Amino acid sequence: MLAFIKKLGAICLGLALLIGYAGKFAPHLFLSLPFPLSIILWSTTGHDMPPYFMPDAWNVDEIDTWMKDGDLVIATGVKSGTTFMLYCTHQIRTRGTDIDDELFADVSIATPWPDLRQSRSGSWREQKGRYNTTVLPDGREMRHYWDNPTYPFRIFKSHFSPPTLPVRKRGGRRIKYLAMVRNGIDVAASAVHFFSSHTDAFRKLWGGFPPNYPDDAYGGDDPPAIVRDLLPGGNLQDLYWGYVKKWWPYRNDPNVMLLHYTDVRRDLRGHVAKLASFLEVELTEGELDAITERCGMEHMKKVNKFDYKMPLNTDVGLWDVDKDRILDEGKIFRDGGIGTGASVFSDKFVARWKKAEEDEFGHDPVMLQWAREGGEFPPVLE
């Protein structure tokens, strides 16, 4: 019996060493394992979640090597209007003249996402140069769409927050940041649908993540795993709670525009004008009207350019760069409503979420109310 125990201990030690070695030098190997073991090993060996997020492009010593003065980073919260703002700011930089979306080949091509690890073993260092050299199926280089010489500024996507994003970096490039918060329980409700909208090809690439949820996943007092992970203490808590707390101190910085999703939806035209002013683009009344119409949900639902391609992927046999997409076609938009979370979750869970808001944000009542409802910021005291 003692010999068996010793042998078992040796096996366990060997497995632990093997897992530790793989976690340090080849964590992408975990993603070939079945879900959820794949993600358990990935996260418990110290790697960020989701597994396809990486912050390297925003390192303070790296950002000036590829950004330009005037560039815009759309750093909205998860499920808080990211694609909405990417498309809308593209309309502003083209003054609404890209009527057929010829310059908007795909959201991930016209407005790149440097956070996104496009291959299992991908890195920012490996992907960086290929943003400039990759040739798309239409024969054009990818940079024609994101770095077109006609643009007054370039647009990049991020889901990171300060200090990962060096918003107050001294010297170097003059970069602008657009951040946007949404009512948290609306984020949670939207996340269930969104995570289920990822293609099987994308899930296979990332070890079964994100998981798929049935249509009735909202029901009951115990929410689906993705919502539990978004709660304080969960694996994805920083996507909402951390996001709000990290951006709030920057709300009055001159190179930051912090918006609330509720405010933008209720006054789209006013916020298009506000964004244009922030981006130093003067619009005529006619241009403002045209851009507002194109930024509306009714128009955006007709635009088939939001499936998120990964043209830099190198996982031959796992991903077809010409055909595969991150999201199922047409699934990125539903109604983008206000107050949807309170209507789909149980009263007990809504109360649980409100208690979490009070625990996380209650030390600053102004932030708590604004995170829930939006509205004007209080005046800055000199």
Image: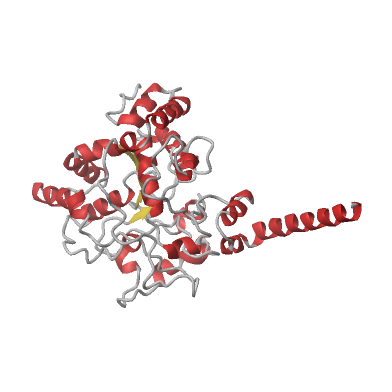
- In the displayed structure, does residue 242 sit left or right of residue 13? left
Percent position of residue 34, x then y: 57, 60
Whether residue 262 is visible to the viewer of this picture, yes or no, is: yes
Whether residue 175 is visible to the viewer of this picture, yes or no, is: no
Q: Judge whether 210 appears above or below 128 on screen.
A: above
Along the line of sight, which residue is nearer the eye, 95 or 234? 234
Percent position of residue 245, x then y: 44, 33
Percent position of residue 243, x then y: 44, 39
**Rendering quarter of residue 267:** top left
Along the line of sight, which residue is nearer the eye, 48 or 3? 3
Q: Judge whether 332 appears above or below 178 on screen.
A: below
View extreme (right): residue: 2
Quarter holding the C terminus? top left
- In the displayed structure, does residue 11 sit left or right of residue 240? right
How are the residues colored? secondary structure
Q: Judge whether 154 appears above or below 168 on screen.
A: below
**Rendering quarter of residue 113:** bottom left
**Rendering quarter of residue 154:** bottom left
The number of numbered discs placed on residues in the rendered structure image is 0
Q: Residue at x 33, y 33 (%)?
A: 342
- In the displayed structure, does residue 264 sit left or right of residue 160? left
Percent position of residue 76, x then y: 36, 45
Along the line of sight, which residue is nearer the eye, 326 or 348? 348
- In the displayed structure, does residue 378 sit left or right of residue 3? left
Q: Residue at x 35, y 45 (%)?
A: 190
View extreme (bottom): residue: 139
View extreme (left): residue: 286
